[in-house]
Image (tube, rainbow, N blue to C red):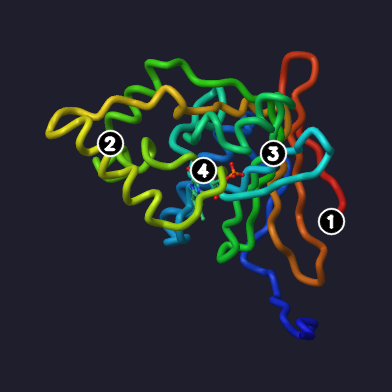
């Protein structure tokens, strides 16, 4: 299948170092708000890239559920493949693709689990079906067929009845604390704008890199 003719002309905006916020998290927030205003689909979806012990990279979407000066938080199963990769490497990359705005943001950072109270509070805010699903799914494990999950959901329902569903001990949040951000804005003739923030000598430095 030849995909050579699939190409877009990028021309919706330009960025320069002078117009960017000094703090990359604040700059990310400005772009996120613009993505929401522009009806970008699932604007908090981000590709999480990890590396396994054999050096193989793995990428998948997760949903950012909190962002502040400490970093980007998402929730998952602590016994999943991604969790094993996050815990052994202690590092990850995130990618926000706001393609209808001809934008992407790349992030590299160090990874830690969030406090149990933070995971508890977020778990308690989830819809009941999602809470049941977290208990029922042995994420990343082999299963014979979907009936395994249906049965597991029934078991969890029987266990909790009408009561509150507590957070599974094997489920919670990770925080990616950035050491690098790159903001990319598509430009005509593939001469795109790329502005990178690197954390050096206790502060953020912004620099332009070639497309
Ligand atoms: C838009 C989107 C959002 C997702 N959000 C999450 C999430 O927040 N947490 C999660 O564990 N999996 C999420 N997933 C599923 C993951 O992409 C992945 O299939 C799953 O976490 C298992 O990954 P692993 O086997 O590499 O650990 C999402 C998938 C999509 C397409």
Q: Residues within 10 Å of mark 3 (few under 14, many from 20)?
A: many
Helix, strand or loop under label 4: helix
Dot 3 or dot 1, earlier in sequence: 3
Dot 3 or dot 2, earlier in sequence: 3
Residue at (74% x, 27% y) in the render: 89
**Badge 4 vs badge 2, beta-carbon distance below 8 Å:** no
Dot 4 or dot 2, earlier in sequence: 4
Q: Residues within 10 Å of mark 2 (few under 14, many from 20)?
A: some
Q: Which residue is mark 2?
A: 156
Give the Cα separation between the discs numbered 4 and 2.
41 Å
Instruction: Answer above or below: position of 38 versus 18.
Output: below
Residue at (76% x, 54% y) in the render: 193
Furthest-right residue in this view: 210
Tell me the quarter of the image containing the N terminus. Answer: bottom right
Helix, strand or loop under label 1: loop
**Badge 3 vs badge 2, beta-carbon distance below 8 Å:** no
Helix, strand or loop under label 3: strand
Q: Which residue is mark 4?
A: 30
Q: Which residue is mark 1?
A: 211
């Amino acid at each position: 299948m030849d995909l050579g003719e699939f190409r877009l002309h990028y021309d919706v905006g330009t960025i320069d170092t002078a117009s960017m916020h000094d703090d990359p998290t604040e700059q990310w927030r400005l772009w996120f708000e613009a993505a929401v205003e522009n009806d970008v689909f699932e604007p908090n979806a981000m590709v999480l890239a990890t590396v396994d012990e054999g050096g193989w990279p793995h990428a998948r979407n997760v949903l950012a559920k909190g962002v502040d000066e400490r970093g980007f938080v998402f929730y998952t199963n602590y016994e999943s493949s991604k969790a094993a990769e996050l815990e052994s490497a202690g590092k990850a990359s995130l990618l926000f693709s706001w393609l209808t705005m001809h934008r992407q943001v790349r992030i590299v950072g160090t990874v830690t689990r969030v406090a149990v109270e933070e995971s508890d509070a977020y778990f308690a805010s989830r819809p009941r079906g999602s809470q049941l699903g977290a208990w029922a799914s042995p994420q990343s494990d082999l299963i014979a067929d979907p009936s395994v999950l249906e049965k597991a959901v029934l078991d969890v329902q029987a266990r909790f009845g009408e009561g509150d569903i507590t957070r599974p001990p094997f489920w919670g949040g990770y925080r990616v604390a950035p050491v690098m951000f790159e903001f990319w804005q598509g430009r005509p003739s593939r001469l795109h704008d790329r502005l990178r923030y690197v954390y050096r000598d206790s502060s953020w430095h912004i620099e332009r890199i070639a497309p």
